[in-house]
Image (cartoon, rainbow, N blue to C red):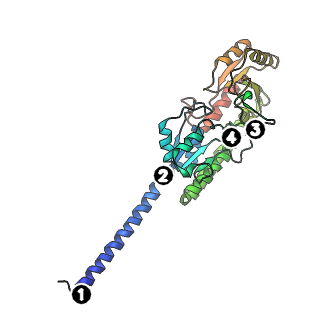
Amino acid sequence: MLTDERLNMYKKKLKSIIKFSFCSILILINTISLESKVSIVTTTTNLKYIAEQIGKENVEVYSMIRGFDDPHFVMTRPDFLVKLNNADILCVVGLDLEVGWIPVLLQQSRNLKIQKGQIGYCDTSVGIKVLGEPTMMIDRSMGDMHIYGNPHYWLDPLNVIQMSSNVLATLKRVDPINSNIYENNYKEFKSRLIILIKEETKKFEPYFNSRVAVFHDQFVYLANRFKFTANLTLEERPGVPPSSRYLEQVISNMNSQNIKVILISPYHNISYAQFVSSKVPGSKILIIPESIGSFDSIKTYEECITESLKLIRDALN
């Protein structure tokens, strides 16, 4: 039979064990929390790159499409839902670029925190000076018009600074403990982009006011930043194959205005550009790497811009 003294001794030991175990559990939880990475899902490879530059070792980023995929039209896969269900953050280009596939995936993801307006939802178009906003009422007869303006804004490196700021704000909401780290990463990336703009603008200066044709109206932000004109489109209406009559007009305009360069993305049908080019003596078709992974050699956003502008400069020469 236990004496009162021995019983009190056992009680003290039990309390010490419980206290030690509780502290150990707290330390373990905090360690797991600190070591776990923020899970980010992005719609494009460029957004993936931006998120990686701001989050670095504190994030794990997955892009739902590849660099040579058309972001307007995406065949969704079951693994998209798995990724979205486990995501802490979803980054989208916005301006209805992904309107044909993201809303349905979000609805089916069963992840409240990445829904539009929630803590983990990041629309990187916020704060962007949008070009090409419609000035009239639009309808489906006008093709795949974007009601909020041209969504290809990432081709202006200055816009990528704003996109990075939006990613930074979202990371700070979701993972406030590492806010200072994210701030420093953002500042470093911003400095690199400013240097990129200055260097590439200087290189392109001899080609200011040059004119090029485009298949789809997606290079307007690149043209606006580096001061060339890219408003002659081979598409009569966005997303709608051009008629023969319209292409004849394009050919006439290119010949009369001495336009010798046609820009096209890797995912568009090149046959229309080839037809037009065959009717314009000395013209060239340039496949522009607008996204990381468009070509195997394009690994960074900076390479997207430098390679795109180099292709255009070489063709204009």
Q: Is residue 56 left or right of residue 219?
A: left
On the image, numbered disc 1 is attached to which residue?
4
Assess whether mark 4 and mark 1 are in contact (beta carbons under 8 angstroms). Answer: no
Assess whether mark 4 and mark 3 are in contact (beta carbons under 8 angstroms). Answer: no
The Cα atoms of the two marked residues, 1 and 2, are separated by: 52 Å
Q: Quadrant of residue 134?
A: top right
Question: Which is more foreground, mark 1 or mark 2?
Answer: 1
On the image, numbered disc 4 is attached to which residue?
95
- On residue 177, the disc is none
Which callout, 3 or 4, points at the residue further toward the start of the chain?
4
Q: In percent of the image, x 68 and y 27: which residue is there? A: 239
How far across and how far down the image is residue 106, in percent? Answer: 56, 44
The Cα atoms of the two marked residues, 3 and 1, are separated by: 84 Å
Q: Quadrant of residue 260?
A: top right
Compared to residue 207, the image places residue 253 above or below, namely: above
On the image, numbered disc 3 is attached to which residue?
131
The Cα atoms of the two marked residues, 1 and 4, are separated by: 75 Å
Question: Which is more foreground, mark 3 or mark 4?
Answer: 4
Q: In percent of the image, x 74 and y 35: which residue is there? A: 226
- On residue 37, the disc is 2
